[in-house]
Amino acid sequence: MQKSFTIVATVLLAFPAETIAQNNTTMNAVQYPQTRKDLSVTDQYFGTTVADPYRWLEDDRSAETNTWVSAQNKVTRQYLEQIPFRGAIKSRLEQLWNFERFSAPFKAGAYTYYSRNSGLQNQAVVYRQKNNSTPEVFLDPNTFSEKGTVSLAGINFSKDGSLVAYQLSDGGSDWHTIVVMNAETKEKIGETLKDVKFSNVAWKGNDGFYYSSYQKPYNGSQLSAKTQEHQLFYHQLGTPQSSDVLIFGGSKQPRRYISADVTENEEWLIISAANTTYGNELYVQNLTVSGAAIVPIVNNMLNSHQILQADDAFFYIETDKNAPNNKIVKAPLQTPLPDNWVEVVAETKQVMNATTGGGFLFCSYLKDAVSQIVQYDFKGKRMREIALPGIGTASGFSGKEKDAELYFNFTSYTYPSSVFKLVVATGQTTLFKQPKVLFNPADYESKQVFYKSKDGTQIPMILTYKKGLVRNGKNPTVLYGYGGFNISLTPAFSVANIVLLENGGIYAVANLRGGGEYGKAWHDAGVKTHKQNVFDDFIAAAEYLQQNKYTSPAYLAISGGSNGGLLVGAVMTQKPALCKVALPAVGVLDMLRYHKFTAGAGWAYDYGTSEESKEMFAYLKNYSPLHNIKKGVSYPATMVTTADHDDRVVPAHSFKFAATLQEMHQGKNPVLIRIETQAGHGAGMSTQQLINGVADKWAFVFYNMGIVHKAL
């Protein structure tokens, strides 16, 4: 089933270490803005009173909160702009970022589409070409708004390619609009659909499409706790959105997450429904029969499933039912219940995810967090393993059933993301597009190591650094982790990390429990009352790096975003002497109230909630970063980062955490919060915003480690 998208020498700067130390003493006397406390705000949990004096910061649209944000950003900017080498870091990043990059192409109708960024464009431009003609601009997101805050958030073509629906996000918000257009003439069709969230666009012929949304969670300036009922609509082209038909969900079938797809043969509507981020129901509707009922294939949320494709006889389903590492089964169209499933591709010791294209199944296996791709036919016959250019991450391998060629991306920590072409019939692969980055991979290496966590579990970690690294305990090191939601951290190139690597640094990524690297058991070992395993795994990674003299506490930074921001917040409050710098980004930091905001209630499979039991409340409170900041403790140099349009992990988490940390922390290390404007949960940021953010990060890290930066 096709899925549409989306050599410079370095010299030492003339800033001797003693100058850095002198400046650091002056700058560490940061005068933080005064944050009002309301001691009357408390909650009761099973007889325990919990104070929440900064709750007023949850109202991110109030004038008082906006004033606080401006004051915090002013202090942060003053601190960062006094760092003597920040400008040099930014200049180096602008050099590094200025390279042409492409997405993998895909076909729709008579055209091949792809996105391209010439280098420093704020957003990639969508191009198309017919046969070997000169490429033309199809959509240029850089022109969507005067301020450049509107970005392309998704694009879906009808089967024949004549129509396109594309989604727009303003400031990185999860709330999107949908614009419909004649793909040939680029003429807009009908009105723009508003208030769409967490949605695919699934075309039903050329008549209309299915999409999903909630009622908006804002009531004036107040954030509502009710964002529970996702709704699947059908939009008929040429009719107003107010006439759209509710197909599934809403108050009659309350589900938090509903997505729809239409099989390539356009005979079946597929509906996936869930209440948390793990486990889903499956429903189908026969589109060839007028008024056909929506019928269940799986009517519980105990496992995860997705329909990969349908032919004249079977649905092909990827599932972890009775197969924690996933398998592929086929289900008869007329009797598709699990009792009738027949195995096509068996479960293995490696976790598997599948795609389809060119009339074949492509199974991507993870072996210790690196990719192995195997091609099967729909009878389950193993055709071949697809040759990859190295040890890393391969993704893509999807297309239409009759595509003779497919495209995929390959990347690693030292291999810039490149596009390869695959001939489906032979398995032959050739390099299609490779970016020219000012980076020589031969100068660097990645090494996978395994270390023991607190309970003896073996955890993999990949270290990337410049060849010839000396283990003297003084290498600036960033330890990155996530550990949640069945998400796997696999090797990926980041131009942002070059600055660290070329300054003698180490980039370390630990594959913690809670992720998906080893299947469902690995995920479940890091959820709810097992969440401490994740933090223990991360702490053990830091201790391994220090014991083996890759680095030491004075030269270690810990970093993570979203659930990874929770990881950093928990570890820095449990082990404040573990590292010199902490970088919690868009983190879930208030574990007692996370489920009361936007989509937070859907994270309960991983976290549990403070209201479900006395035991769960006590467990959450015991590690909740916000509730474990202690007065008089010296915490690491901390830069909390969030964004004003983050409506997934609302900025209140970061606001309250930073305010409490500034109040309680005692020591010379700075505690700052950097609040990006016109950006969301890691989405919607322009190239310049990305460069500025990375420059601030490395300046903060190097400065607080006392590192003298190398730059051009």
Image: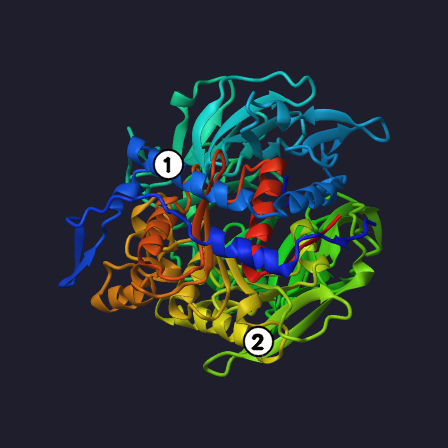
| Residue 109 in view of the camera | no
- 631 left or right of 27 in image: left
- 400 left or right of 588 in image: right
The label shown at residue 393 is: none
Choose the circle earlier in sequence order: 2 or 1. Answer: 1
Residue nearer the viewer, 295 or 169: 169
Percent across and percent down for residue 654 are 39, 49
Percent across and percent down for residue 186 are 65, 19
Front label number (2 vs 1)? 2
Q: Amino acid at mark 2?
A: Gln
For disc 1, the neighbor class at 10 Å (few under 14, some 14 to 19, many from 20) is: many
- 320 left or right of 659 in image: right
Q: Which residue is mark 1?
A: 214
Residue drawn at x 64%, y 53% as measured from the top left: 355
Percent across and percent down for residue 344 are 62, 63
The quarter of the picture where residue 458 lies is bottom right
Cα distance between the residues tagged 2 and 1: 48 Å
Residue nearer the viewer, 681 or 426: 681
Q: SS class of the residue under badge 2?
A: helix
Figure check: 468 above or below 394? below
For disc 2, the neighbor class at 10 Å (few under 14, some 14 to 19, many from 20) is: many
